[in-house]
Image (cartoon, grey):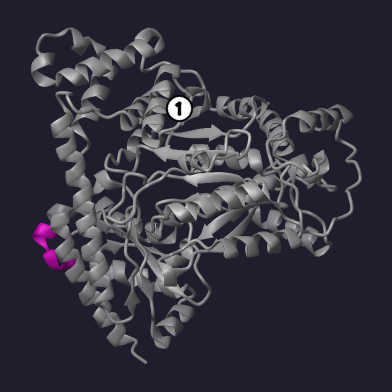
Amino acid sequence: MRRFASDKARRAVAASLRVASRSAAPSPAPAPHPLSPAPVAAMAAAMARFMSTASAGVPAVSLDTINPKVRHSPPYFNSFSKLEAWSAEQSARGLKSFGLDWCHCLGCSALLVLKCEYAVRGEIFNHAQKLDCVFVCLLQNLQNELQKNPESLPFDEMLYCNIGNPQILGQQPITFFREVLSLCDHPALLDKSETHALYSSDAIERAWQILDKIPGRATGAYSHSQGIKGLRDEIAAGIAARDGFHASGDNIFLTDGASPAVHMMMQLLIGSEKDGILCPIPQYPLYSASIALHGGSLVPYFLDEETGWGLEIDELKKQLQEARSKGITVRALVVINPGNPTGQVLTEENQKKIVEFCKNEGLVLLADEVYQENIYVEDKQFHSFKKIARSLGYTDDDLPLASFQSVSKGYYGECGKRGGYMEVTGFSPEVREQIYKVASVNLCSNISGQILASLVMNPPKAGDESFESFMVEKDGILSSMARRAKALEEAFNSLEGITCNKAEGAMYMFPRLHLPQKAIGAAQAAGTAPDTYYAKRLLEATGIVVVPGSGFGQVPGTWHFRCTILPQEDKIPAMISSFKEFHEKFMDEYRD
C-alpha cells in the first residue's frame, strides 16, 4: 500500500508540474502496458488538466511520459551477482532493466541500492572506523593504551573532519534550547519551586506555550504527519520575520532533519531513469544518493572553482539542453546555499537569475538552505530563495519551490536530535495533498526535533531573560567558526600543491590538490582515486579524517578533499601543524 500511495502521488505531482522537454526530439510513444488499468491513466489525465502550476503553454504530459513502463518483468534473484548479470543482459539487448512496474521487487531495489553511495560515510569513513576499531574496540580503551604506550600510533587522537557533526567535536548545545526541551520532555518539573532557580523564566514560559500546542502535552505520542500545527505556525512566523513576506504553517512539513524532506521530494519527482534532477558538482552526496535510490538521472552542472565556486546560468542552460537532447525530462534544479562542500554564498543578483531560469524552464526549485546562519564574510548575507522570488513579484502561481532547513547546522549543531522542515510553495492544494500522502507513510517526525525546529526559527528576543546569554553563545560559536575557516584557508594556501577558495559560509573547506604524477601513479597502482589515496595516507599519518573530492564530484582531472572547520578552536593550531608536516613529506616522497 505504501508503494502504491507513493506511485499515485508521484504521478499526480508529475502531471501537475508539466515539466515537459522543450528541446529534445520527440520519441515514439510506448505501447500500452498490459498491466496498466485504464482508470489510472484517466485519473492522471484528469489531474493534468487542472493541477498545472508550471509555465503556460507547455503541453500536458501523458502518464506514459511521466512514468515510462517496463516491458519485461524480471525473474526473482537470490544474489546480487545474478541480479547484476541479468541486468547487464537486458541492457545488452537494449531493454530497460528497471522501472515502476516492478519497482517493488527485490531486483529493482537491489539495483538502486547498489547504485547509491554516500561519500561522507563511505570508504574513507569506513577506513577510519577500522583504525578506530583496532585501537578502540579491540583494546576497549584507547586513551589508557596511548598513555601507557604513546608510540603505538603516530597520533594521540582521531580528528573527525569528515562530517558536519559539531557536537562530536566539542561544540556545546545552546542553553535556552536544551532548557526548553528538558522541560517539555519532563513537564512535572514545571510544577516544582526549585525549577525557577535552575531555569530561566523565558525558558519556563516557552515550555508552557509549546506544551499547550501539543495534544495531550505528550511529547512521546505521535503527532500530525505534517508536524504539530502550533509548531508549524511558529516556524512560519519565523520565516515571515526573516524574509519580510507572508508564510503559512500549512506549507510547512516537519521532518527528521532535512534529509527525509529531500528524499520525499525526489520520490515525488522521479518516476524513471528518464526523469532528471539538475545538481551542482561538487555536491552534497545526499542528492546523488537519493536520485540513484529513486531510479532517476542526475544531471550535473559544474560550479566554477576559478570564480569562487560560482553558479553560472550559461552552464545550467548547457546541461539542461544536453539532458533534454538525450530524452531526459529535467524536473527540478537543486541549489545549495551556502554551498556544501564548497562554502560559497550566492549573491542576491545570482539568485534572481536562478529564479528566473527555473520560472522560464518550468523547473521545481529545490533550495537547500540548512547553512543559512553560517555566513563568515561581511560583504555577503543570506537571502532565502522564497524571499528572492517574492521580491521579483512571483507568487505561488508562478514558481514551485521547496526550501529545506535543519537543526543540525547553523550555530545549534543538534545533529542527533533530527529536526528539520521543508516549506513548499507554488504547488496547488491537490499536489500538496500528495506530498502529505507521502509524508504520512512515516507517521510523523520526532517531537523533540519538531520543538527544536520551532525554537531555531524563534529564538529568544531582546527583553527576554535569556536573550543576552543566548547571543553570547550564538555569536561566540559563529565568530569562532569564522576564525577557524580563515586559519585553515591560510594554512592550505601556504602549502605547495594546494589551492583553496575562501569559505564564505557553511562548515567546510574544499581545497584542490595539485598532485605530482608519481603520486597519481601510486594511487592508480593501489586501485584508488588520487584524492582517496591522499586522504588515506593523511589519516594513517595524522588521525585527521577528511573526505576525498571524488565523493562529491569534481571536474575530471582535478582532485580535492573536504575538511570541516569544526574541530574546536584550541585544536586548530596542532591540526594545521600536523597536516603541514604530513603534506610536506608526502610531496617530497612523490616529487616528480
Is 375 placed left or right of 240 in the picture?
Answer: left
The answer to whether residue 195 is magenta is no
Residue 224 lies, in percent from the top left, at 49, 18
Residue nearer the viewer, 81 or 227:
227
- Residue placed at 69% from the left, 46% from the top? 108
Q: Which residues are magenta?
A: 146-156
- Residue placed at 18% from the left, 23% from the top? 464
Q: Check the image and name the residue furthest to the bottom.
A: 592
Residue 94 in the image: above or below residue 251: below
Q: Amino acid at mark 1?
A: Ser
Residue nearer the viewer, 291 or 361:
361
The answer to whether residue 152 is magenta is yes
Residue 170 lies, in percent from the top left, at 20, 46
Residue at which label 1 appears: 445
- Residue placed at 26% from the left, 53% from the top? 566
Is 478 placed left or right of 127 in the picture?
Answer: left
- Residue placed at 18% from the left, 37% from the top? 471
Observer able to see residue 513: yes
Residue 77 in the image: above or below residue 526: above
Determine the image quadrant of residue 416: top left
